[in-house]
Amino acid sequence: MSHPGLTSSVLILGGVLVAGCGGRDRGAEQPRSATVPVPTVRVGDCAAPERDGVRGEAPRLRRADRDLDGDGTPEAVVADETMCTADGNCYWNVFVRTDGGCERYAGALAGAVLEPLPMTTGWPAVRAYWNLGGNRRVLVQEYRFRRGGYVLSDTLVCRREDDDRLQCTEDTR
């Protein structure tokens, strides 16, 4: 038979112990990737660049359309400027055309600059550069096109040299 006073004391003590174990300060950790906010649609859904993707309450759209698949027609690439950082980092929503007549949401790429990589077959990988402040450190993220959308496949933290070269090292932890 359980004692009501003892049960509630154990629960309160357990809650205090859990609250006291907050863990490490997350702000002190080095970022492994720029976290993308939740978009208004899922990857692969029919969507409209003017209203869908990662966006704020009162979006101000910036277009940076480019031909990603090499067919001569640019794909819609759109960011909401209200969600861009002071360092120029934005969440670039990518939309791809399908034979079915709709533009499908292919994901949001986080960065100040997007660089499509040389294409072998299909959709090329895209490298995104996320400024980490002070224009000296950069998070380089590579996105691969898989199953109808872009997914993060690799990240590196780099340092910009005085001559604009990026010095990057891989974390072996």
Image: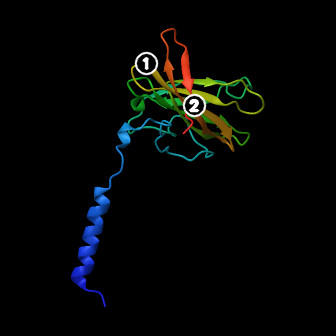
Q: Amino acid at mark 2?
A: Glu
Whole-percent x and y of residue 107?
A: 58, 39
Name the secondary structure under disc 1. loop
Q: Quadrant of the image for the N terminus? A: bottom left
38 left or right of 57 in image: right
Left or right relative to 96: residue 6: left
Residue 135's disc number: 1
Q: What number of labels is visible?
A: 2
Side of 43 where 120 appears, left or right: right
Residue 64 is at least partly visible in this image:
no
User: Residue 15: x, y in percent?
Assistant: 29, 65
Give the residue number, with chain letter if any, for mark 2: 170
The disc labelled 1 sits on which kind of residue? Asn
Q: Which residue is depicted at the point 67% across and 42% down?
A: 148
Q: Is residue 52 above or below residue 85?
A: below
Q: Are marks 1 and 2 in contact (CB under 8 Å)?
A: no
